[in-house]
Image (tube, grey):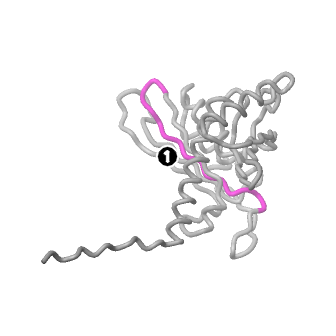
């Protein structure tokens, strides 16, 4: 007599379903961000915000030159909308364009500036000190710039320069309050990874408001 095999039905975990959807949404946003950066690099693409509603998907693109996104008579933004429909399967996307108010507080723009500066050559450490000084001077509560790779002449070993000022939590939910961007620079002597993190002015942390950060003398006195 054959024994009956017991069949076990999978137990649905609503938390796992929510977590999976959250991860999928992050991946979609990341892919959309990469797509827009390639298409809108001349417009000074900084970041994208996506808000889904039952009827439409609102996509807000932050750039330094909104005119290049809209195009003459809206031709460019219409073509961009159609491309996103086909590539990402977004139903009824509505794209709006916002102009970046302060480029020194946009991590992606700062990272791109650092990447371009490294590719032109010059003193990497001095340039990074100057850059983080400008970020803090524009009101940031905290800033971090990390450059990793061959930061010297050809033949030099890879190393890392890490500058950090102000308040930047490293763990916990509060890290979601920090804006972050990663890029790569390609000087003649080897690739360099760049990471920029900025805490925007007015950011509220659980422990309350933060006081203005005084710059260390070594950075305050640095020159371009």
- Between 87 and 140, which is closer to the camera in this rendering? 87
- Within the magenta stretch, is there residue 198? yes
Quadrant where the image shows the N terminus:
bottom left
For the point 68% across and 49% down, which residue is it? Answer: 220
Q: Quadrant of residue 114?
A: top right
State the SS at label 1.
strand
Quadrant where the image shows the C terminus:
top right
> Quick check: 211 above or below 121?
below
Residue 34: x and y in percent read 59, 38
Query: Quick check: can you spot residue 217?
Result: no
Find the magenta span and give its range.
Answer: 187-202
Residue 215: x and y in percent read 68, 56
- Within the magenta stretch, is there residue 122? no
- Left or right of 157? Residue 89 is right
Residue extending farthest to the right is 73
Residue 4: x and y in percent read 22, 76
> Quick check: 149 above or below 213?
above
For the point 63% across and 34% down, which residue is it? Answer: 86
Residue tagged by mark 1? Answer: 161
> Quick check: 16 above or below 36?
below
For the point 58% across and 53% down, which residue is it? Answer: 26
Query: Quick check: can you spot residue 43?
Result: yes
Residue 58: x and y in percent read 76, 47
């Amino acid at each position: 007599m054959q024994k009956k095999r017991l069949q076990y039905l999978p137990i649905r975990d609503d938390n796992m379903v929510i977590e999976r959807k959250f991860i999928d949404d992050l991946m979609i946003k990341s892919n959309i961000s990469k797509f827009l950066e390639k298409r809108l690099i001349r417009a000074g693409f900084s970041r994208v915000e996506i808000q889904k509603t039952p009827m439409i998907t609102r996509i807000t693109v932050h750039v330094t030159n909104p005119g290049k996104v809209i195009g003459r008579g809206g031709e460019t933004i219409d073509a961009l909308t159609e491309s996103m429909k086909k590539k990402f399967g977004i139903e009824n996307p509505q794209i709006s364009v916002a102009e970046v108010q302060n480029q020194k507080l946009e991590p992606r723009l700062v990272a791109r500036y650092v990447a371009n500066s490294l590719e032109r050559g010059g003193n990497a450490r001095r340039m990074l000190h100057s850059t983080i000084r400008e970020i803090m001077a524009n009101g940031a509560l905290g800033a971090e710039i990390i450059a990793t790779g061959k930061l010297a002449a050809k033949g030099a070993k890879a190393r890392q320069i890490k500058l950090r000022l102000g308040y930047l939590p490293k763990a916990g939910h509060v890290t979601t309050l920090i804006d972050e961007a990663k890029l790569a620079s390609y000087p003649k002597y080897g690739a360099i990874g760049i990471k920029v993190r900025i805490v925007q002015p007015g950011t509220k942390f659980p422990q309350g408001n933060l006081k203005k950060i005084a710059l260390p003398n070594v950075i305050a006195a640095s020159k371009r």
